Image (cartoon, rainbow, N blue to C red):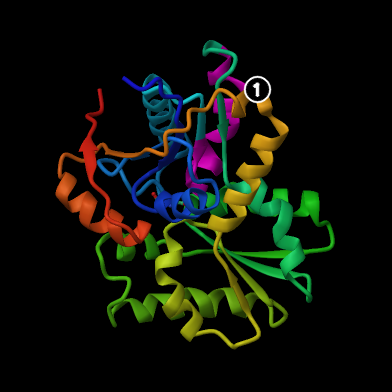
Amino acid sequence: MLNKQPIGIFDSGYGGLTVFRSIADQLPGYDYIYLGDNARAPYGNRSFHTIHQYTWECVQMLFKMGCPLVILACNTASAKALRTIQQQDLKNEDAAKRVLGVIRPTAEVIGDYTRTKQIGVLGTKGTVQSESYLIEINHFFSEVKVHQQACPLWVPLIENGEYDQPGADYFVKKYLDQVLAQSGQIDTLLLACTHYPLLQEKIRAYLPAHIKVVPQGDIVAESLRNYLQRHPEMEQNLSRNGTQEFFTTSDDTSDFDYHASLFFSEQVISEYIPLK
Ligand code: DGL
């Protein structure tokens, strides 16, 4: 049996697969375990308490599967659960375990994309209400003005396979109009939800050409590469057999596999992992 110390990647459902795609491309060779909490997705409109409880349960499942490092490839979980996990929950775990999110690495670089210094941040209700992007972006780029827009119907449209259907256009345009109405100076739109890259084609179609649309996958992957270079004690612990395993808390794995393959741009075969 292989002695595995994989990198764990967590999302409420499928969205984290867009981040995993970039990580697998940029950092091949490591062992990876992806866990989607599809039985309880979406998280976006849930309370702080519930998102923390669900996220921590899933992180512990990944720890039990041998992951010393877990990436919360979900903005909602990063916004609502990461701080409590890092500051409280991890104290009762093996001291070498680490959990990282996607908001800080994105906030660290997004200011470099804008010339007008005005950015639109599109996310779930939970991410927007947490104001995590406002705070983090202004920490790194105090001159940048951040305009947030919640897009609560985008995740349900995507999870239900409607993202490339004509019916999705109405809600794509609606939230884009709302964010652009906040300022005529916005030249960069951050897709601050890991599901949204699936809507990227439709989003692009409703925007003027000078506005950049920035998904997070490559930013997070680059930041992970950097983290592993700076933390050889973690990097040397990770196993490198090049395996990728997929788990979902939904008992309908064939449905997961169908959707997951679209998000991951490669065939996915998953296993069911029941919630306790
Ligand atoms: N993909 C998640 C994110 O990045 C949101 C999905 C959900 O609402 O569960 O925020």
> Which residue corresponds to mark 1?
233
The magenta segment is: 71-91
Identified by mark 1, the residue type is Glu
Residue drawn at (43%, 28%) of the image? 59
Q: Residue 42 vs residue 182: left or right?
A: left
Q: Residue 127, image x and y in percent?
A: 53, 51
Mark 1: secondary structure:
helix
Residue 270 in view of the camera: yes
Q: Nearer the viewer, residue 175 or 36?
A: 36
Q: Residue 163, image x and y in percent?
A: 32, 71
For the image shown, how many numbered marks are present on the structure? 1
* Res. 155 image quadrant: bottom left
Residue drawn at (46%, 73%) of the image? 200
* Res. 3 image quadrant: top left
Secondary structure mainly formed by the magenta segment:
helix
Image quarter of the C terminus: top left
Whether the magenta-drawn stretch holds residue 151 is answered as no
Q: Nearer the viewer, residue 139 or 230?
A: 230
Whether the magenta-drawn stretch holds residue 77 is answered as yes
Residue at the right extreme?
143
Q: Residue 102, image x and y in percent?
A: 57, 46
- In this rendering, the answer to whether 149 lies above or below 129 is below
Q: Nearer the viewer, residue 255 or 245?
A: 245
* Res. 100 image quadrant: top right
Q: Residue 149, image x and y in percent?
A: 55, 65
> For the residue carrying disc 1, how many other residues have a C-alpha within 10 Å: few (<14), some (14-19), or many (20+)?
few
Q: Residue 232 vs residue 72: left or right?
A: right
